[in-house]
Amino acid sequence: SKYTSKRGESPVFFRINNYMPNFLNPSSFVLTLDSQAYSGAEFTIQTMVLPDVTTEGAILNYKSIDVGRAGDKLAFGSFEISYLIDEDLLNYKEIFDWMKANVEANHSTTTSSDHYRDMTLTVMNSANNVTKQIKFVDAYPTSISSLPFDITTTDVEYLTAVVTFDYSYYQFI
């Protein structure tokens, strides 16, 4: 076949319109959060995973068989990040206060869109130029991890927190 290589030859790569892409570097990204309460809070992201997107196909009953059809709804997985905690705990408190405000808003008669924020994931290439941005629309935190303080540690290990967000959807912008 024209898409496979012969023994001893370099593999043949799939090309789109004769374009050979560079591969995505998984360590060149920045997450921007609309920080409302603490303007000095910065989030140095350590790890994150672009959430999964699924759709369930619809079944069409036709005579004696079930025919699969493409689904009509997308389901987006939760978005989880881990980030370094600053020594003033500003970035931890930003998420904590956001969660607390959401809970308090659910117990009041007023509803506010202030409890949902858009977040933007910026992906960069090997030259640190922006290649894509992914916008998480109407995001809100659902959990934040504990912080393990330990006086017996001999090496300095900076604390990280893991926060999980739900959101309406994400889109490439």
Image (tube, rainbow, N blue to C red):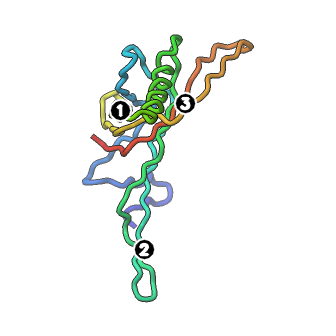
Coordinates of residue 120 in the picture (x, y in percent) = 34, 33
Q: Secondary structure at mark 2?
A: strand
**Where, quadrant-wise, is the N terminus in this rendering?**
bottom left
Q: Toward the viewer: 101 or 145?
A: 101
Asked which quadrant contains residue 162, the reply is: top right
Discs 1/2, front: 1
Coordinates of residue 24 in the picture (x, y in percent) = 40, 39
Q: Which residue is mark 2?
A: 59
User: Could you say which disc has been placed on residue 37 in the image?
Assistant: none
Q: Which residue is mark 1?
A: 117
User: Could you say which disc has been placed on residue 144 in the image?
Assistant: 3
Q: Toward the viewer: 43 or 129?
A: 43
- Residue type at tag 3: Ile
Please report whichever mark, 2 or 3, sits nearer to the chain's N-terminal start.
Answer: 2
Instruction: Describe residue 158's horizontal placement relative to residue 58 as left or right.
Output: right
Coordinates of residue 52 in the picture (x, y in percent) = 46, 49
Coordinates of residue 65 in the picture (x, y in percent) = 45, 84
Q: Are marks 3 and 1 in contact (CB under 8 Å)?
A: no
Q: Residues within 10 Å of mark 3 (few under 14, many from 20)?
A: some
> Is residue 58 something that shows in the picture?
yes
